[in-house]
């Protein structure tokens, strides 16, 4: 008896579902893509329980007659590909012909549609055991697809779905990406009957940016536009001062398809080199329009990655586009930067032979400045325990073991982080005038959903409507100039925890993440000099923490140059 057998269609479709459908947001993405390809100008998405119970997508596109409605649910049935050559010239979003049958294999699906100017429509229901029921329906403009009980027949996959808020967060992100890429289409999203997003048709990309991310946030971005040899790069990049602690709000669209691409990402970071600190990240919405024959979209089953025919040209053009926006009126040659695989030497030692030219040690720690008179004129001996500053970010003290160098911001972060986690020393300070902060739709819903948790950290806020929150009190001493930045960082931390798949639904990881972000905003800046008494208190508090050697983000708070290290540097060993 043969050991090899041809798999049944239902199992083939479930395997395809495993490649195409990761979670409810994947279904939303596929259905929106089909609606866009159908020429829709209006797409409405209704969700129940994070998409686990219902995903309903309605559009006003071209619709289908009865025959096409039947065929669209068959595997590898598509209107996008006619020949092998078409595989390498994809100009539409959905093209594999696997999405609908894959969705139908792991859920209950209802499709209602009618062709333009038709007197009747078609309604197809696929339920348990793939039973198909086809009936006539009323004429309607476009197509409506309802997907219910995702993974109802594959419990092993259903158990990997995350909490309702987490799945909803992924859906919001998907809809926002699609809405941003297609400003000529109106989008609405509701969850359990409540409106989440409602954006009308926008006249241009900037108007859509304001609709989705607020006018206040849009003001932090620079417009980008550059083209050459049939390639156009355009969009928005944040001003250097808006750089954040996390890689949030970084989007790349190739032919309006949201993708990840290391070539473009490297070009962007190269353009920002020297303008933002190494531990901060720019935000950007970068679009690349290119001949579909010069980009391969078949690299990833979910179409998240693409491959360019000429990546060097894309790297150069993207880098020059960002550089031109950041440096108006300057030459763009410096935007080209090194190739992505170039290694950088972050530490070097330069020796000088005479006493007048002492050793200069430049490293990731910063520059040791021999002109610091408060150190070199103090007659340092083993009995002296005073502090001296190194540049704007560090201070140092002599110990019995050598020279201890401290990053005052990182040290303060560790101290505050542990205080916030203990929640025993958080003093809340009411604002004389409440502050309003307008936020992007996803971050707004995350902050409102976790406002009780934030209250425990001394942040009192309320829903102000229209993606706005009103902040009434903050932890005492927290700078009030960047409230939106703090809330955006907290929202990014919530997304980080909810999408990591490690701590979904567990409060512990989220508490730690939020505590670290508030501590970062509240801790002293590197450029704020502290006196000896303040530094003594800082060192004492740091020693009392559970992990004094690292800040909450994992960076070192202090580094010891031991006597043995110094002997080696001076070649005495």
Image (cartoon, grey):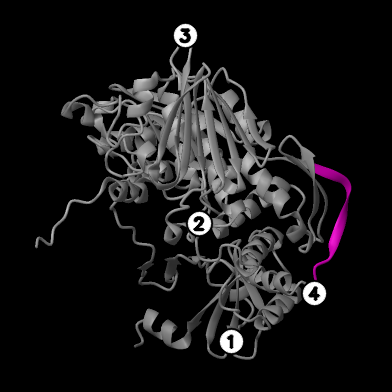
The residues colored magenta run 425-435
Disc 3, disc 2: CB below 8 Å?
no
Picture layout, residue 1 above or below residue 315: below
Which quadrant of the view contains residue 265? Answer: top left
Picture layout, residue 77 above or below residue 443: above
> Which mark lies nearer to you, 1 or 2?
2
Q: Which mark is residue 491?
A: none
Instruction: Tell me the distance, in whole angstroms, between the alpha carbons under discs 2 and 4.
Output: 36 Å
Residue position marked by numbered label 2 in the rendering = 161
* Numbered label tally: 4
- Residue at (64%, 48%) from the top-left corner? 488
Label 3: state its secondary structure. Answer: loop
- Residue at (32%, 38%) from the top-left corner? 98
What is the crowding at mark 1: few (fewer than 14 residues within 10 Å), some, or many (at least 20)? some
Q: In this view, does 340 lie to the left or right of 273?
A: left
> Which mark lies nearer to you, 3 or 1?
3
Residue position marked by numbered label 1 in the rendering = 399
Reply yes or no: does residue 370 show up in magenta: no
Label 1: state its secondary structure. Answer: strand
Q: Is residue 324 visible?
A: no
């Amino acid at each position: 008896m043969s050991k090899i057998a041809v798999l049944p269609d239902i199992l083939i479709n479930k395997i395809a579902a495993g490649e195409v459908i990761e979670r409810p947001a994947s279904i939303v993405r596929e259905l929106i893509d089909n609606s866009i390809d159908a020429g829709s100008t209006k797409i409405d998405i209704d969700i129940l329980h994070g998409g686990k119970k219902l995903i309903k997508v309605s559009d006003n596109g071209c619709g289908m007659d009865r025959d096409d409605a039947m065929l669209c649910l068959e595997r590898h049935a598509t209107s996008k590909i006619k020949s092998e050559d078409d595989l390498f010239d994809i100009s539409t979003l959905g093209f594999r012909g696997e999405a609908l049958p894959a969705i139908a294999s792991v859920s209950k699906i209802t499709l209602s549609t009618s062709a333009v100017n038709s007197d009747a429509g078609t309604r197809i229901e696929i339920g348990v055991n793939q039973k198909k029921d086809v009936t006539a329906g009323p004429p309607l403009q476009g197509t409506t697809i309802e997907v219910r009980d995702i993974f109802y027949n594959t419990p092993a996959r259903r158990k990997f779905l995350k909490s309702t808020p987490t799945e909803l967060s992924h859906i919001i992100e998907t809809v926002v990406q699609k809405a941003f890429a297609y400003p000529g289409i109106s989008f609405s999203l509701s969850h359990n009957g409540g409106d989440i997003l409602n954006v009308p048709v926008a006249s241009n990309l900037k108007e859509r940016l304001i609709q989705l991310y607020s006018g206040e946030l849009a003001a932090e971005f620079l417009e980008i536009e550059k083209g050459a040899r049939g390639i156009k790069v355009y969009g928005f990049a944040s001003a250097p001062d808006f750089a954040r602690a996390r890689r949030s709000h970084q989007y790349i669209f190739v032919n309006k398809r949201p993708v990840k691409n290391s070539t473009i990402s490297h070009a962007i970071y190269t353009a920002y080199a020297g303008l933002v600190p190494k531990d901060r990240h720019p935000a950007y919405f970068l679009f690349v329009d290119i001949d579909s024959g010069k980009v391969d979209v078949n690299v990833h089953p979910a179409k998240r990655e693409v491959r360019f025919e000429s990546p060097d040209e894309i790297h150069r053009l993207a880098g020059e586009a960002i550089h031109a926006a950041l440096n108006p009126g300057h030459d763009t040659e410096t935007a080209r930067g090194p190739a992505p695989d170039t290694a950088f030497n972050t530490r070097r030692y330069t020796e000088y032979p005479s006493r007048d030219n002492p050793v200069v040690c430049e490293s990731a720690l910063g520059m040791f400045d021999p002109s610091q008179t408060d150190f070199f004129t103090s007659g340092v001996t083993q009995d002296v325990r005073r502090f001296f500053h190194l540049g704007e970010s560090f201070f140092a003290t002599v110990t019995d073991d050598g020279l201890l160098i401290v990053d005052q911001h990182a040290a303060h972060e560790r101290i505050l982080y542990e205080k916030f986690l203990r929640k025993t020393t958080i003093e809340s300070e009411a604002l004389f005038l409440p502050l309003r902060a307008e936020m992007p739709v996803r971050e707004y819903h995350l902050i409102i959903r976790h406002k009780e948790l934030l209250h425990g950290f001394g942040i009192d806020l309320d829903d102000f409507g229209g993606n706005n929150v009103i902040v009434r009190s903050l932890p005492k001493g927290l700078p009030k100039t960047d409230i939106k930045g703090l809330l955006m960082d907290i929202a990014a931390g919530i997304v980080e925890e909810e999408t990591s798949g490690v701590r979904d639904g567990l409060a512990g990881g989220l508490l730690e993440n939020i505590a670290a972000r508030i501590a970062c905003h509240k801790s002293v800046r590197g450029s704020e000099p502290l006196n000896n008494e303040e530094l003594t208190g800082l060192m004492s508090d740091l020693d009392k923490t559970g992990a004094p050697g690292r800040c909450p983000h994992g960076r070192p708070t202090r580094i010891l140059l031991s006597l043995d290290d110094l002997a080696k540097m001076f070649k005495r060993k």
